[in-house]
Amino acid sequence: MESMRNTPRSCSKLVALLIIPCCYLVGCASSVVVQSDFPTPLVEPLPVRVGLIFGEELRDFQHHEELPQQANWTIDLGDISITMLQPLFESMFVETQNVEAIPVDMPENNTLDGILKASLNRFEFDVPVNSDNKFAEVWMQYQLDLYEPGGELITEWQVSGYGKAEIGRTKRTESVSRAAINAMREVGATISTRFAQQPQIGFWLKERQNTDFINE
Amino acid sequence: MNRTAILKTGILGMLVTLLCSCGVTSRIEPYKQTNSVIGADDQLVVLARKHHTNYEAESDIVECISDGLANGSEALNVHSSVEFEDKLYPWFEPSIAPLDTEDLSELLEKPGVAGRIEETRVRFVVWLDGSTERVASGGGISCAAGVGGAGCMGLAWWEDDARYDVTVWDIQELASAGTIYADYKGRSVMPAIVIPIPLIARPRAAACKGLTQQLREFLTSPFGYGSSPSLIGATE
């Protein structure tokens, strides 16, 4: 009797046995592309002219992670952070303009009060395995660095946002996307309502108002 | 009585018991503390409380109540929840949204907020707090397949609890108009005699229907509606 191990037929079975779990694993890889519009905040603009710099990672951000008992996740934020932050800053300050670098090379007739650099420090998420937990969760931490136009750092402010979205009849990937959008809305809400309340920023704003008053 | 008749009676009795054990039990406690009623030009908005870490009112019950109030013979003017939150962004985001009418008064003093709310014509904000949770489950079903066929045998059951607190704010009066507490418990059973037969209770759908009906009365009845805490209980 021919041994089963050495036949071409048994080899093909072995290949099939290897391919099936691989296909299964590939099928479990989850990919999320986060896209959304954000509302313009209803806030009174602060009387300062601010230059804006967005960190390179904000232009094309991707998060890769393998969750325990789950497959690989890829969350593609692309440039959605800029989509959220640019109009947010435009409504927060009387005047904004995008600048290339710090310190700013300014023409005499175009003076800025400060430079705000935004970057994304951390991105974390969780998708429940069992049915007891109904929410996908996302936690994000942005960093805002405020500089004098000459390049001197005024303050660093870390802003966190948490978002959750129920996993009901929708796909898990859609829930993660909605949770990320909710987290970003929270970040936008915190920045637009608490920016001026930060001690160093409050001092900088007062200083700028006094300077304007003296110049007038 | 022969053996077949006894068996038939037994199975019938078991099915009746199962059908009786499946259903929704409701408890509603409305409390209206003002005589405010919604005007012909006034709008209302239903918003979910989202600041709790472990639960939040599901978006489908918010939509269900909004649609229920906006439709029917006594339709009310209901503003879209998403549009309202976007127009008032960031002031109704979970971490910033007013938690009581004092917070609401402070919010209305902020530049542009009162004007924007006036543009929406929203007079009543209906806050929905709570969720539907599975509180118990048990039993089991075994299935087997063979050459002669396949079949299942057993009994599974589960109980869902839809518990919601509704708070109605009157923006014109800057006061809470009252509250409605609703608790709907639903027990579902799935007997399997060869094939599983799901007898599913839907307490969230029942809570939506009950709360919509109560809210409609709440917003349109000036006197004699839930003037003190009372119980309205029913089994469906």
Image: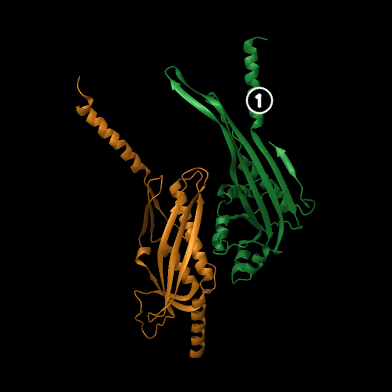
Q: Amino acid at mark 1?
A: Val
- Seen in the picture, residue B204 relative to B97 is either above or below; the reply is above
Name the side, left or right, on which A129 lies relative to A26.
right
Q: Quadrant of residue A146?
A: bottom left
Q: As displayed, is residue A15 above or below residue B126?
A: above
Front residue of A94/A7: it is A7
Check the picture and name the quadrant holding the C terminus of chain B: top right
B82 or A24, nearer to the observer: A24
Q: Is residue B185 left or right of residue A192?
A: right
**Measured along the vertical axis of the image, is residue B4 above or below residue B142?**
above
Horizontal relation, residue A52 to residue B181: left or right: left
Could you tell me if residue A38 is visible in this image? no
Residue B209 place in picture, x, y as percent: 65, 43
Chain under numbered label 1: B
Residue A210 shows in this picture: yes
Q: Is residue A137 left or right of residue B79?
A: left
Quadrant location of the N terminus of chain B?
A: top right
The colour chain A appears in is: orange
Q: Position of residue A206 (x, y in %)?
A: 52, 82
Q: Where is mark 1, residue-wise?
A: B16
Where is residue B82 shown, x and y percent of the image? 55, 56
Which type of secondary structure does the marked residue at label 1 adopt? helix
Q: Residue at x 66, y 62 (%)?
A: B100
Near mark 1 (Cα within 10 A), the count class, few <14, some 14-19 or many ≥20, is few
Q: What color does chain B have in the rendering?
A: green
